[in-house]
Amino acid sequence: MAVVYDTRDRFLGLGWYDATSPLRVRMLHVGSPVTIDLAWWRQRLETALSIREKRFDPSTTGWRWIHGENDGWPGWVLDRYGPVLVLKLYTAAWLPWLDPLVPLLQERLAPAAIVLRLSRNMAIEAEKQGRRDGTVIAGSLPGDSSPVLFEEHGLLFEADVLRGQKTGFFLDQRENRVRVESLARGRIVLNTFAYTGGFSLYAARGGALIVESLDSNPRALDSARRNFERNRGLRLPRDAGHELIRADAFEWLAAPGASRYDLIVLDPPALAQRAEDRPSALQGYEHLARNAWKRLRPGGILAAASCSAQVGAKDFFQVVQEATREGPRLARVLETTGQPADHPACFPEAAYLKCIYLLKAGTRR
């Protein structure tokens, strides 16, 4: 733990020091000196839980309990998937605190299991301390295996909590999935970077004529297929059309193809991990939007999202709008969105998620 002073050698606060991380100090506390003990953490946990408790009805059993720095737990993310908690750490400074804090999570939230996930930058240090990514550190998984099943607005999904991206699912796109559902009726829908089919299932439930899920990862597409089948006939129409496309989305959209879609979802992984990646990321978003726009029929809708913290909302929205100005059809902005309430952004750099909905409207005069 680091004691932080200002330029006049006055006590400023306490933080985690991590020599292996690009963020050398993550602030835990700013203000008068405090004692960092279990009681202090218990209070911080209760504060984070109070923001989420009673926010979701019983039809949703997956959300974020703790969102890192924004909840006063820097470098610590805690997600819920039904009876399982997934704890992802982004700094090795947390490792010595696992033994006292994991029992606190068990006592307060009573999960069947807690799974530990680790960012790549801390893997070596974690292994020195006997910790590895994708291990169960408390309890046991239902059926003693992954994936874990959970519900989101009445749809049943699986989350690969041991090996999946992030903590196993993209919980932050929950509200955008609901918006896509409201737009899907009677449309042919393409879900690019589909991962395990989140947007696809919502579009099908919303009445899409057919949904195509495009991803380059065969394991992700297998999961999308299973998610679709476990909901078919109960939560989805029995005859809901769903096709899988295994391809690189950049290459597939750029290839010649008919304008056959009425709704296209662009939700790529973060294209800018560092500040120096920003120009290439903006270029990537522009290419995706331009090529997707060509695949839309008149009256179609493009939902384009970015989870790159290094690319601000203003720049992202601008580059997508510029990419859709080509051709005779006008692009009309229907809506822009940000992060859901369980992923709060309490400082500018934390506002990483943004999405814009554009209608391919009438012809230019």
Image: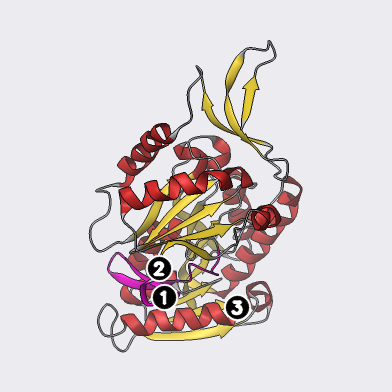
112 or 44: nearer the eye? Answer: 112
Do residues under tags 3 and 1 come within 8 Å of each other at their CB atoms? no
Quadrant in the picture for the N terminus: top right
Amino acid type at image mark 1: Asp
Q: Which residue is mark 2?
A: 140
Q: Residue at x 58, y 39 (%)?
A: 349
- Judged from this view, the residue extending furthest toward the right is 276
Say if the magenta span includes residue 327: no
Q: Which residue is mark 3?
A: 217
Residue at 55% x, 80% y: name it: 219
User: Residue at image x 42%, y 83%?
Assistant: 226
Expressed as whole percent of the image width and height from the top left, the position of residue 96 reads 56, 45
Q: Secondary structure at mark 3?
A: loop
Q: What amino acid type is highlighted by mark number 3?
A: Asn
The percent position of residue 29, horizontal first and vertical second, equals 52, 27
* 62 left or right of 215 in image: left
Q: Which mark is residue 144?
A: 1
Q: Are marks 1 and 2 in contact (CB under 8 Å)?
A: yes
Mark 1: few/some/many CA within 10 Å (<14, 14-19, 20+): few
Amino acid type indicated by mark 2: Ser
User: How many numbered markers are drawn?
Assistant: 3
Comes first in the chain, label 3 or label 1:
1
Compared with residue 124, is residue 236 higher up or lower down, i.e. above or below?
below
Magenta segment boundaries in residue numbering: 142-165
Distance CA(mark 3)–CA(mark 1):
25 Å
Which residue sits at x=63%, y=62%?
326
Task: Farthest residue to the top: give it.
Answer: 8
In the picture, the disc for residue 96 is none
Between 67 and 136, the residue placed more toward the observer is 136
Whether 40 is drawn above or below 223: the answer is above
Q: CA distance from mark 1 to mark 2?
A: 6 Å
